[in-house]
Image: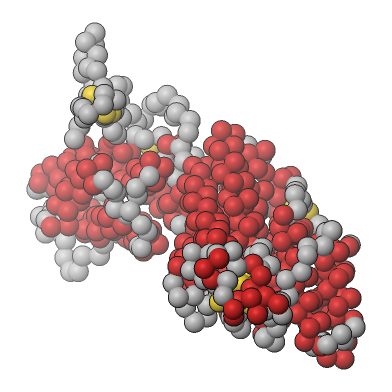
Amino acid sequence: MEGSWALRLALGHVRCAVVAFVAAEDSSGESLFLAAECLDLEGLFADLGVEPEPVDPGASAVASLDAASEALATVRPVVPLAVWAGLQAVRARAVR
Amino acid sequence: MTATVGRLLDDAHARTWDLCSQLGDHAGDEAGVDRVVGLLAAWPGLATAALRVLDAVAVEPAWLDDAGSVRDVLAEVVRRPPLPPSDDSVTGRVVPDRSVLAVATRLGMVADLLAGQPPARSTVDRAALVGLHANVVAVVHALAVATLAVLDGQRDVQSSRWLFRGVLVRTERFAVLPPQQRSGRYEDVAATGPEGSLDSAITGWVRATVDVLASRQRVTQTALQVAAGDALILTATAGTVCAAAAQLGVVDAGSAGVAGSALGAAHAAWRTPTGWPSTVRLDGVRDLDQVRASRQLRQLVTDQLREGKGWLPPDVLADRFDVAALLGTMRRSLHGVGNVALAHFQAVDTLVRGPGRLWIAANAVSQPAYRGYATIAAAVRHGWVPMPPMEPTGLALLADARRALAATTAAVGALDGTAAATTPGAGPSVGALRWERGRIVAYAPPDQAPLFETVRTSGLAGVTAEQRRPVPLDRRPDRGPRR
């Protein structure tokens, strides 16, 4: 997979994760903070000038984050470390 | 500790009470001429400070302003200061009484904090303003009582006595208002809290977010989404604190219920603007000030009000915080969210209606007139095109922003309602002044008229007739000064 295409795909999945997190009925409020962290991640992509690729929403926010991670894993050498670390941190918090 | 209008008023009332007690303890003694001169000399400063507070927030419509008579008499005190007794022992420079000056300084600080407040237009704001005026005028009333008592027995002070009797008459109906009916959102107005406090983080967040959203060059999709996401978090936080306050009995269940529903609606309204549709985008580099302010806000909310993956339960909140003060912080934060909501709506409105920078996925363009060759070519390669005017997707974004603004405005008013007075006061106690809930209250004479007459408009179509409260024919009319 081409590097820029993978980044675009990953951003599309992260955007889907945001929508899923804010739509979640979660009285603990944890999903709101996860959505905010995903928005921070989107900001990193925006700084890199990545255009999002419209993708079908995943089964859940966590599934979307997993899909983004898989997309980036295929082109790991070209993925900025900040993006990779940020995505893994959100994934870890989401499944905790 | 954050300086709020409420805390400054508490301090002013406590100092006034102490001064009255001090003068009362020495009522039998003959007050020194220097003391009398000092008290009288401090009055112009006190009256000026009280006038500043009375003028700090305008009332709309203006005819509902009920403090005109108090303003007149205070202006008279400033214009023609009370004259000291003509005693040969008064020599040298006159030093105004320090205790009264300290009270005046606090009232001046209250006026400073209230500077820039918008006019009180809603019923809730007007009621809060009447309460604020009552809290300020009660201090003036108490000091007038004390000063008049000190003037008793002094020679050549008749004109000053008349002046203070005028002050007493005009301030009395404010001073008898029970403290429960004086509370309101203006008591929450605060100076920026110390660095690292939630108040300070909220102030910084509002400033940074409104700055970036108001800039045509710096606003981006991420900026709009982050603003909406933070508003989502703050409405949830306010809802949690409000529910805890109701459970702990800090606010009454009725107003907390109304505020809770309004906050729930505002929270729901911010969900859609937080997650944009995947077919729309707006490029741009992040504004680092906003990013920093947003992270700090979330960090403080997490550190102070959350534990693990959930909100702190009410009893733990009560252990760690003054829940009433925390609810005041939430009211201030929601006013901040209101400002952000307005900036957010205006930014989206400019982007959607104006010659925009919004992009839409080419295969999502729904208007046939804009499905030209370039759009189809872009759709084939899964590309993006500038969003055409009046595109339904853009209009939906605008509708969502408008809904968020409207719901937030309603929530601001409802949460302000938790600061408003609800329960009627207890019966009058014996004595000219009494201390109740940290505030000075004057003894209410029987049948004291309320501050406002009840005036309502007839419901007949096409007819605007005023209907005044019926005069009770079986007893004497209400006493007390009327407008």
Quadrant of residue B88 within the rendered picture? bottom left
In the displayed orientation, state which residue is furthest to the top. B474
Q: Which image quarter is the N terminus of chain B in?
A: bottom right
* Left or right: B147 in relation to B244: left
Vertical order, B463 against B84 (above or below): above
Q: Position of residue B343 (x, y in %)?
A: 47, 66
Vertical order, B277 against B124 (above or below): below
Q: Position of residue B221 (x, y in %)?
A: 60, 73
Please name the residue shown 33% across and 53% down the image.
Answer: B119
| Count of marks overlaid on the render | 0
* Left or right: B430 in relation to B149: right
A57 or B430: nearer the viewer: A57
B323 or A16: nearer the viewer: A16
Quadrant of residue B477 within the rendered picture? top left
Q: Position of residue B315 (x, y in %)?
A: 74, 45
- Is residue B119 visible in the rendered image? The answer is yes
Please name the residue shown 71% across and 50% down the image.
Answer: B317
Q: Position of residue B174 (x, y in %)?
A: 31, 39
Colour setting: secondary structure
Please name the residue shown 11% across and 56% down the image.
Answer: B80
Q: Which image quarter is the C terminus of chain B in?
A: top left
B222 or B384: nearer the viewer: B384
In the displayed orientation, state which residue is furthest to the bottom. A77
B103 or B277: nearer the viewer: B277
- Is residue B23 visible in the rendered image? The answer is no
Please name the residue shown 82% across and 66% down the image.
Answer: A64
Vertical order, A92 against B289 (above or below): above
* Left or right: A66 in relation to B238: right
